[in-house]
Image: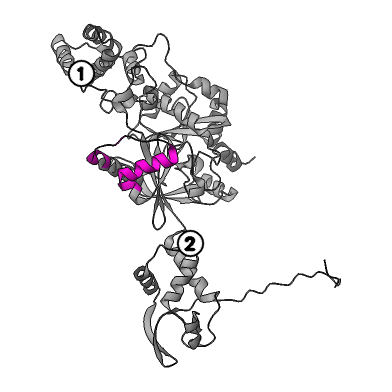
Amino acid sequence: MSNATKFADVFRGLQLAYGTYRVDRKQANGKNVGKASIVQEPRTAELWEGHLSGKGTGIGIIPINEDNQCVWGCIDIDQYPLDHKVLIERVRKMKLPLVVCRSKSGGAHMFLFTSDWVPAKDMQKTLNQIASALGYGGTEVFPKQIRLFLDRGDVGNFLNLPYYNADDGLRYAFNDDGSAATLDDFFALYDKHRITREQLSALTITERPDMPIPDGPPCLQHLAQQKISEGGRNNGLFNLGVYLRKAYPDSWETELMTHNMLYLDPPLPLSEVNVVAKQLTKKDYAYRCKDAPIAPYCNAEECRTRKYGIGAAVSSSVVANLRKYNSTPPIWFLDVNGEPLELDTDGLMAQSAFQRACVDQLNHMPKTAARNQWEARINQLLKDMVETEGAIVEVSEDASIDGQFYDYLEEFCTTMQQAVVRDEILLRRPFNSEEDGRTYFRLKDFEAHLRKNKFFEYKSHKIAQRLRDINGESVVIKIKGKSVRVWTIPSFNSSVVEIDTPDFGQNNEAPF
């Protein structure tokens, strides 16, 4: 088996599309940026060989397949610079079956491989738990989706693969000693760390009986085990206090003193503990999930399942991963609590339309947010979409409204019953003039053809503009002594297709 075949087998995923990426420049923080696109066709052996040789296009794979399952997932650590050796040591200390690779920008892609297809939802959940345990909570994980709307054009997000230009490139895996792994070394790492479906289930990081902060947020449990050091002590103790008010409503102030001594290094002085306690007496207290030292260890999905987790404090729906199907008009896909939601532009801009789409498609009614909060959320999603590789999917011309319009125009001009002489335009027929290479027709006759095909996207003024875009013009001609306004456009190339009549032999007997 060739290296290209083995590599393709490792990174199986969605068959009908793949991603490509062209690096244009490097940002000040070291991240490479460029142009990403999705190619909606199967991958070939030549494509894989071109990736590994560096002589072809770099490949990005969408890990979730047509059945919403995967055989690999990835935690994408977008941190520059990054000490990969320290990261690998932490991964091995926690006995996690991950293969760590250098990303194209110098960050890390931590791959989890399975020998069997597993539900994308299970893969995503496990990767989020691992990311939180490693201190990279909130980091992007692939698959980004747990389900795709393939029949509506949603192909999800792709991840650029390692080993572009194989052993001479910079997207390589790391051996346990931090050295660069050759392609053969990568295959060995894959064989060593690949796990079964049952092992994936067992890998789920659950709360141990002896875990500190019982039934509390995973972030606080991880921080308590390593102790919260200077720089994050005040906010760390505040979050511990939020937990204590939930878990020990009658004695939380006493518990706050104890937890300060147990889990802060060094503990805060009494005066600062009292300041934190005073802040916690306010009615609007809640976990500060987005602030240090909490944010790197956040696992919101797991936290919601904990008795004293974020619960109602963060009750809004999880809305993420905005994608744009760049047709005319565009179609948008947005993940709501992990489920893909299809929207038009009005549904993206107007919160009430978004909620209606959630009820129609997901049987879920998100709570109404303040207008400024909603607009800020959509703006952030749009910003993230622009920066996410392959989130904007370019479509073929015939998939756009314009493309459909011109298809109907060509059909009207070439396949409808055509006028033999110009006078027959009055019989609702287009007239193709060989003399000037142009086609003449009345606008109302073409509009009737569009209505017959249930095309209602353009009104008359928009149709006129589209005709002008292809060098069309409105003129008045004389037909039987009468002035008639018609449109004239360059004639389409038409060809006669000859179809051979099938030979049924010499038997002239009637079949019935």
Picture quarter containing residue 326? Answer: bottom left
Part of the protein shown in magenta: 347-374
Q: Is residue 170 visible?
A: no
Q: State the SS at label 2.
A: helix
Look at the image and say whether residue 366 sits in the magenta stretch: yes
What colour scheme has been applied to the protein in the rendered image? one colour
Hey, what amino acid is under mark 2? Asp
Who's the residue at 30% across and 47% down the image?
A: 349
Task: Return the residue at label 2.
Answer: 398
Judging depth in this view, the residue of 418 and 445 nearest the camera is 445
Q: Which residue is mark 1?
A: 234
From the top left corner, tell me how far across and down residue 437 is, in percent. 48, 83
Q: Left or right of 179: which side holds 462?
A: left
Please tell me how crowded label 2 is: few (under 14), some (14-19), or many (20+) other residues with Cα within 10 Å. Answer: few
Q: Quadrant of the C terminus?
A: bottom right
- Mark 1: which secondary structure? helix
Please indicate whether residue 259 sits to the left or right of residue 32 in the image.
Answer: left
User: Residue 155's spot in the image, x, y percent?
Assistant: 48, 45
Q: Is residue 10 shown above or below 246? A: below
Q: Nearer the viewer, residue 51 or 375?
A: 375
Q: Nearer the viewer, mark 1 or mark 2?
A: 2
Task: Name the amino acid type tagged 1.
Answer: Asn
Locate the N terminus by quadrant: top right
